[in-house]
Amino acid sequence: MIKLLLNNQISEQDIKAYQSKVTKINKMIDEKTGPGNDFLGWVDWPVNYDKEELQRIKKDAQYVRDHFEVLVVCGIGGSYLGARAALEALKGLKSDDKLEIIFMGQTFSPNYVSQVLKYLENKNFAINVISKSGTTTETSISFRLLKELLERKIGKEASKKAIYATTDKEKGALKTLCNQEGYATYVLPGNIGGRYSVLTAVGLFPLAAAGIDVEAMLLGAKEAREAYDNDDLDKNICYRYAVTRDFMLHRDKPVEMYVTYEPQMSQISEWLKQLFGESEGKEKKGLFPSSATFSTDLHSLGQFIQDGTPLLFETILNIETPNDDITIPHDDADLDGLNYLEGKNLAFVNQKAFEGTLKAHVEDGHVPCNVISIDKLDAKTLGHLFYFFMRACAMSAYLLDINPFNQPGVEIYKKNMFHLLGKKGY
Ligand code: PA5
């Protein structure tokens, strides 16, 4: 379902040198013996997911589609990025779906929050609040404001049928509130961390509400699990990619740039940045994940990538067949000089931009470029891709002797902020 072409600065021999480490780590993942092993629930999730809950998610999501104009998805980090990435990748940036999806809870910005609340004043909207801990400040503030607006508009009782929560099975402030108010709730399993949760209710409820085939996504992930649960470095492209990342880091390429030629994939890059950045960036180790959308960013970052400090390698996400295409028309005057492209499709032009840039970066710029190709962007392929990257991330982090599943560094800013805000105990 996906193809991997590794950059020309790593040889088969270099890859093979990792075999014994990869064998050991793959066993560690399967047997759940490595650091952070109580957060490996995502590994078998594509087969072990709660089937009853999925049916409930689909039914409730259909109810939301049939009864509301807008669904506000309220969450941050792993409780936000995956759903947004999949939504944009599959529905595009100008979706005309009957249900509009808006994201909130991912910022303190008074401008953004005020704008969304004002927009919702005259809309018939539902809320999907997502927080594993149930105490994340950005999400909690937004949810308080959204709930207040909703109850003011339609009353407390009716609001109960318009609020859907995804949180821990038993604990946390949000869970207590859900129990008290009787909101529909879905579970973010205790053994799955936020950034590995896109295939749980965290992603599935908003995506099902958007009309996306979430069972196809899970099926894609299941196929990926079957394909990548082995240590054979000749065949396992997931681990070949993970090994290449480690190799690049140790060859003075501390930055990985995710590149796409599809603007609707740029949120996938954001999801990747969180997945790899938060999983690996510890103990003064890890690749710095960055991203660019070409050809747009060739007119901004292109110069640096081609000729600047040689600190990065690219991982290009290439979609071979776009879902839509458009033909360049004839123009009698041809004052723009474009008649040489008359009758050609934009997919053809985008493809040539990709090929020309790849050649420039590899041959002239000596930038190592990996290419991950998928035939088509659909729910099943995306489910496969999500799993591919999560498994590659676990392998990469373990190759660095890092626990991929914690994020101790994230707590420090929170402590300072709580102190400055006057929160009790800080
Ligand atoms: O990956 C993670 O664990 C984090 O990014 C969390 O998802 C994020 O901090 C939000 O946490 P919560 O779901 O508890 O509100």
Image: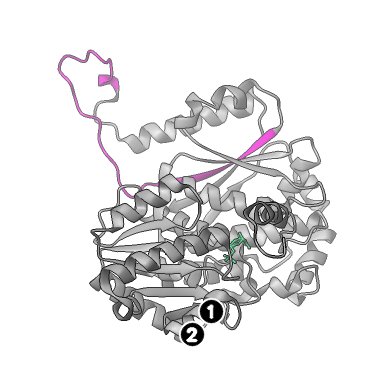
How far across and how far down the image is residue 349, in percent? Answer: 37, 31
The kind of residue on which mark 1 rests is Lys
Whether residue 47 is situated above or below residue 406 in the rendered picture: below
Residue 141: x percent and y percent?
49, 61
10 Å crowding of disc 1: few (<14), some (14-19), many (20+): many
Give residue 79's position: percent from left, percent from top: 53, 63
Instruction: Decide which of 330, 194 is in the foreground and name it.
Output: 194
Q: Residue at x 48, y 47 (%)?
A: 109
The numbered mark at residue 358 is none
200 or 398, which lies in front?
Answer: 200
Contact between labelled residues 2 and 1, with CB atoms less than 8 Å apart: yes
Q: Is residue 358 left or right of residue 425?
A: left
Q: Secondary structure at mark 1?
A: helix
Q: Which residues are magenta?
A: 312-340
Quadrant location, the C terminus: bottom right
Front position in the image: 406 or 14: 406
In the rendered structure, the answer to whether residue 288 lies left or right of residue 170 reads right
Q: For the residue marked with disc 2, what is the amino acid?
A: Asn
Q: Which residue is mark 2?
A: 179
Tell me if 88 is positioned left or right of 304 in this view: left
